[in-house]
Image: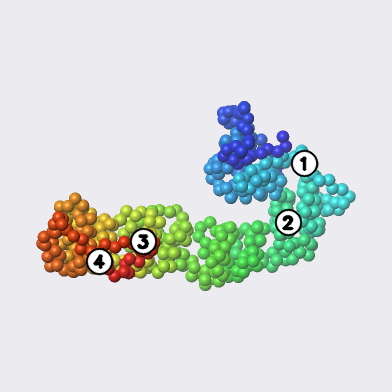
């Protein structure tokens, strides 16, 4: 076969039928996955480690049963994401290694590199005679293959690039990489330059002049990164992007390079400048301020994590999602550390849980250690009063949130002081459900405008009216369904009604 298909599906698609016979897993493990020497010779040197793993493992998966030939399986085994797989296979498709049949879900066909079923387009030799001669002269140490020539022809036809311009790009790549450079790399460079509008010899000369003009700047950047070797083509393109497209000056780029920690590289610098670009930071002064702020946020994140009892190897997510937003709300550093400690003591051991507490404090305007400590002290004092009320009912137990809600209603909404509430609690001592009894009794006193312990005790000592012959002492009213619905819909505003 001249094309092999690896389809990333967990189950067979609708209408697909599984074959009646298949290889056993033992048989598959004892066989071999053949790798075309053309891949090793022409493509492998220009693939990164992850791309090589993806290509080879995908090739191996072509022989697996459909149930094992899944996207999830490949991602799990190689430790890559679906987006990384898709990007790798798009690059492979550009290089003619495979064809992406479907993006979602990902479905890939591995192509035969010998193209037995896909004969190359025929080009008249006399049309390309001069180009062939000049191209071969650039590689005196080896003979170019018909396949290589065909790749150049196809690229030139598809991109309307002048032949002499292509020869100049080839020469530039040879100067950069040496005689061992292969056509996939050269065509990748040409593709990037075409994307920048390069079509003619003059365009190539302008591009090379840009690279030459930045020679001194490149030396400064390499020095800031601690590099003693020369710059790669990709790195020159990065420098042009930083200065021409993103608008960074050389001093700012040097500042960013020096601010990098261990493992300084162009890719790391590119990520840092991308971060600055997205944050609208372009000068050395702004970068220094930003870096100082980030270091402060990192130190704060470490203290918070330590107090709440969590650990993250990378703090970038913690800083972006939690620490910076909390600081932006106005919380002092010590206040955040204090909240983290209180969360740990209270059994809240996650940053998400702490975030909920932070939002509650923010809603109350409690942003400093003093304000938070004062609030907590008042809550402790309130819990102490609630414990006295519970004890007055003859019970001994911990204070619950329901107790706090009831107490807030009795005091803030109904207007009773602690003495009256204790009187009601003592009167309900020994009842099966004392809290409910206290609620009912205080509600009755509220309706009778009781405001003092003396009035409460007078009502408690008064004889209860006999149920025999008891007449209704209120006017019975009837309401329409519409009236009741209007009132109950507006129940949130009951606190605004004078009863």
Q: Earlier in the sequence, mark 4 or mark 1?
A: 1
Toward which corner of the image does residue 252 lie, by quadrant?
Answer: bottom right
As rendered, which of 23 and 409 lies closer to the eye?
409
Q: Is residue 92 above or below residue 69?
A: below
Q: Nearer the viewer, mark 4 or mark 1?
A: 4
Q: Which mark is residue 480?
A: 3
Determine whether, in the image, residue 47 is placed left or right of residue 199: left
Distance (Cα) linking label 3 and label 4: 29 Å
- Identified at 52% across, 72% down, the residue is 285
Q: Nearer the viewer, mark 2 or mark 4?
A: 4
Determine which residue is flagged by label 2: 190
Dot 4 falls on a residue whose secondary structure is loop
Dot 1 falls on a residue whose secondary structure is loop
Tell me residue 439's x, y (percent): 23, 59
Distance (Cα) linking label 2 and label 1: 24 Å
Q: Quadrant of the C terminus?
A: bottom left
Q: Which mark is residue 127?
A: none
Determine which residue is flagged by label 1: 118
Distance (Cα) linking label 4 and label 1: 87 Å
Q: Earlier in the sequence, mark 2 or mark 4?
A: 2
- Mark 2 residue crowding within 10 angstroms, few (<14) / some (14–19) / many (20+): many
- Mark 4 residue crowding within 10 angstroms, few (<14) / some (14–19) / many (20+): some
Q: Earlier in the sequence, mark 2 or mark 1?
A: 1
Q: Earlier in the sequence, mark 2 or mark 3?
A: 2
Q: Nearer the viewer, mark 3 or mark 1?
A: 3
Callout count: 4
Q: Earlier in the sequence, mark 3 or mark 1?
A: 1
Determine whether, in the image, residue 35 is placed left or right of residue 375: right
Determine which residue is flagged by label 4: 414
Dot 2 falls on a residue whose secondary structure is helix
């Amino acid at each position: 076969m001249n094309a092999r298909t690896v389809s990333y599906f967990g189950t067979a698609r609708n209408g697909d039928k599984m074959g009646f016979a298949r290889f056993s897993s033992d048989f598959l493990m004892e066989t071999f996955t053949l790798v075309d020497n053309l891949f090793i010779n022409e493509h492998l040197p220009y693939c990164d480690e992850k791309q090589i793993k993806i290509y080879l493992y995908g090739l191996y998966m072509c022989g697996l049963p459909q149930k094992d030939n899944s996207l999830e399986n490949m991602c799990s085994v190689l430790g890559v994401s679906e987006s990384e797989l898709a990007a790798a296979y798009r690059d492979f498709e550009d290089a003619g290694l495979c064809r992406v049949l479907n993006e979602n879900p990902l479905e890939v066909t591995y192509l035969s590199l010998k193209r037995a079923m896909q004969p190359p387009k025929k080009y008249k030799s006399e049309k390309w005679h001069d180009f062939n001669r000049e191209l071969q002269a650039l590689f005196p140490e080896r003979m170019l293959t018909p396949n290589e020539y065909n790749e150049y022809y196809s690229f030139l036809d598809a991109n309307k690039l002048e032949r002499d311009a292509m020869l100049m790009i080839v020469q530039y790549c040879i100067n950069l990489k040496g005689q061992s450079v292969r056509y996939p790399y050269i065509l990748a460079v040409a593709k990037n330059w075409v994307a920048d509008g390069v079509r003619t010899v003059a365009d190539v000369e302008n591009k090379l002049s840009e690279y030459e003009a930045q020679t001194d700047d490149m030396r400064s950047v390499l020095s800031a990164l601690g590099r003693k070797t020369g710059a790669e083509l990709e790195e020159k393109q990065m420098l042009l992007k930083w200065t021409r497209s993103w608008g960074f000056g050389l001093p700012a780029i040097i500042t960013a390079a020096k601010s990098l920690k261990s493992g300084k590289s162009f890719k790391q610098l590119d990520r840092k400048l991308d971060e600055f670009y997205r944050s609208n930071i372009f000068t050395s002064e702004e970068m220094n301020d930003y870096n100082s702020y980030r270091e402060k946020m990192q130190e704060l994140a470490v203290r918070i994590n330590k107090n709440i009892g969590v650990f993250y190897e990378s703090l970038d997510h913690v800083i972006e999602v939690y620490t910076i937003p909390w600081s932006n709300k106005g919380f002092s550093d010590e206040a955040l550390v204090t909240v983290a400690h209180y969360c740990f003591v209270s059994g809240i051991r996650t940053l998400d849980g702490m975030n909920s507490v932070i939002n509650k404090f923010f809603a109350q305007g409690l942003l400093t250690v003093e304000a938070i400590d004062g609030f907590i002290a008042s809550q402790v004092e309130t819990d102490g009063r609630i414990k006295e009320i519970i004890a007055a009912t003859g019970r001994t137990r911990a204070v619950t949130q329901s107790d706090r809600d009831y107490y807030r209603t009795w005091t803030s909404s109904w207007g009773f002081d602690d003495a009256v509430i204790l009187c009601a609690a003592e009167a309900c001592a020994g009842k099966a459900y004392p809290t409910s009894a206290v609620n009912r009794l205080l509600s009755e006193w509220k309706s009778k405008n009781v405001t003092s312990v003396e009035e409460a005790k007078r009502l408690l000592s008064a004889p209860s009216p006999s149920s025999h012959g008891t007449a209704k002492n209120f006017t019975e009213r009837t309401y329409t369904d519409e009236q009741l619905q209007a009132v109950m819909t507006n129940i949130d505003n009951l606190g605004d009604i004078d009863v």
